[in-house]
Amino acid sequence: MPASLTLRAGLLSVAIFAAFIGAWYLATLPTAGSAANVDPEYAALVSGAASEGQKSAFPTPMDVGGTLWEHLKNPFYVRGANDQGVGIQLAYSLGRVLVGYGLAALVAIPLGFLIGMSPLVYRALDPFIQILKPISPLAWMPLALYTIKDSGISAVFVIFICSLWPMLINTAFGVASVRKEWLNVAATLEVGPLRKAFMVILPAAAPTIMTGMRISIGIAWLVIVAAEMLVGGTGIGYFVWNEWNNLSIGNIITAILLIGLVGMALDLALARTARLVAYRE
Amino acid sequence: MTEKPLISIEALARRYPRHGGGETTVFEDVWLPIAKGEFICLIGHSGCGKTTILNVLAGLDQPSAGVVIVDGREIAGPSLDRAVIFQGHSLLPWMSVMGNVAFAVNSRRPDWSKDRVRAHCQKYIDVVHLTGSEHKKPAELSGGMKQRVGIARALAIEPKMLLMDEPFSALDALTRGSLQDEVRRICTETEQTVFMITHDVDEAMLLADKIVLMTNGPHAKIAEIVENTLPKDRSRTNIHKHANYYALRNHLLDFLVTRSKAFTAESGANGYDPKKPPIVRPGARPVAVETGPPEPGHAVSA
């Protein structure tokens, strides 16, 4: 009898990971003899061994593992403005995302409800939504910096604006496409508008709304890194840019890995919540 | 009709604007009184506007002309007095069986305590034989069970009138049969007034006191009202043994197969009045037609 699919998939995952690490290891093995054509300025930036070509400037898997361990061992240290633990940086980023995203949810879900309930409002707001939706959230940044005059709040605003559209559009769509027969049931039972909104329309549209919320959190987490590279100061995006300026590729890879893990955790949390409101017809 | 009807459908019509100008009349001049405690079945071919009439009765749709009078007043919208059992079961899928029934009961009796609502719901869940499935979600139920929940939900609000739009059409024959028996039992016991749409002649003969026949659309109207001449205690197992069974069944089938198409020509000949469609009693001993001259060939004597 063949092993279960989960087990085989797990084994394959481990094999792919091992192959990837192996390839990385081989690619960063020290090479000899090509030292002649290294730019002296570059040699001054990277370590002596790397400049002579014996050791790649790109860290080996073991180097990155070591860096990762260093970061995880003490994630919350603060040694001045430019040297804070990666945990602190992630917390800054998460805080901005959650505030911007939360505000966007507070606006998008009630507004989407209204739009979905009224074909008139739906049609009237549609051109605005269609034009505003495809704008890269970072394009709002200069405008936000100019009007808000605070880089931290501007970053939150950028998160707000990028989280808004998927939630707004999905809520409006979910509410507008509640099955007519369910509304007829509510009508024949003389259910009041508020009770209808909370007992019929909201549960019926909840899975669609949750899909919008899941898309939004994904986008917000993508955008925060870029936004923090622009505004600087704190956050994981700033950390990545700072380490690029330090040319510390090991730290950058560590940060990339952590960004991925946090993004996955956010998505998983919302997927769990979505399961709570899901229903089978 | 001596007693005042519970509901009176008067001069109801439905017209749609036709593509390229003009209007299409689906049905017009539909008059029908429904007395308290009556079980009325409406039979007609697709497209004669049966569902529209039911939706107007439910308050979910507006007619182009005419009114429906309930208790001396024109109906303006949906009401808890008229419960609807929909063709698709239309249960709310995120609620349990109990939740669906309780949602309806809470709407009817917002002042009742939780326990009282629960007990009331349980009573009707028991009536439709769903005891033990209270906490299941609709997706976990079979088609027949879902339709039972729909029936329990409609009955639990204790409406003055029950409206059913082909409630059994989506079910398999066995389930349909047993549910028909149950609906007949419940409606006879509670003397429920029922208006039901069907296209199934046997279903109408089993359940209805009066079978209303509609001509084909467009310009559909009520051709005649057939009184069920089978005994009150009929059931699925003995109905076909009654002497009037074939007279009634043949009359209904004749109508659906031939007369529903050619009714306009036929009605011109014998003074048809849409306000008082002829009442027919196939197989009954006294002569069949109450209004207008008797129709030879359809008033079959037993």
Image (cartoon, coloured by chain):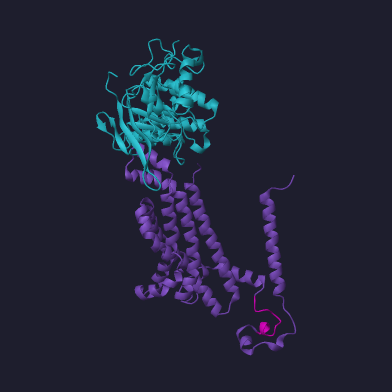
Q: Position of residue B159 (x, y in %)?
A: 34, 29
Tell me where the magenta segment starts and ends, as one range: A48-58
In the rendered image, which quarter contains the N terminus of chain B? top left
Above or below, A240 against A43 in this view is: above
Question: Residue at left 55%, top 76%?
Answer: A243
Identify the chain drawn in purple: A
Q: Residue furthest left?
A: B72
Quadrant where the image shows the C terminus of chain B = top left
Point out residue B243 in the picture as x, y percentages from the top left corner: 48, 11
Residue B160 left/right relative to A86? left
Q: Nearer the viewer, residue A212 or B244?
A: B244
Q: Is residue B238 visible?
A: yes
> What is the number of callouts on the image?
0
Horizontal and vertical percent position of residue B111: 30, 35
Question: Residue B92, located in which quarter of the rendered image?
Answer: top left
**Would residue A84 be seen by someone viewing this image from the given angle?**
no
Task: Return the residue nearer the eye: A197 or B290.
Answer: B290
Residue A150 lies left or right of residue A27; in this view the side is left
Q: Main secondary structure of the magenta part?
A: loop
Q: What colour is chain B? A: cyan
Is residue B59 magenta-colored?
A: no
Q: Position of residue B164 (x, y in %)?
A: 41, 30
Which residue is drawn at the image coordinates 52% and 77% (left, top)? A242
Judge left or right: residue A20 versus residue B286.
right
Residue B284 vertical placement versus A23 (above, below):
above
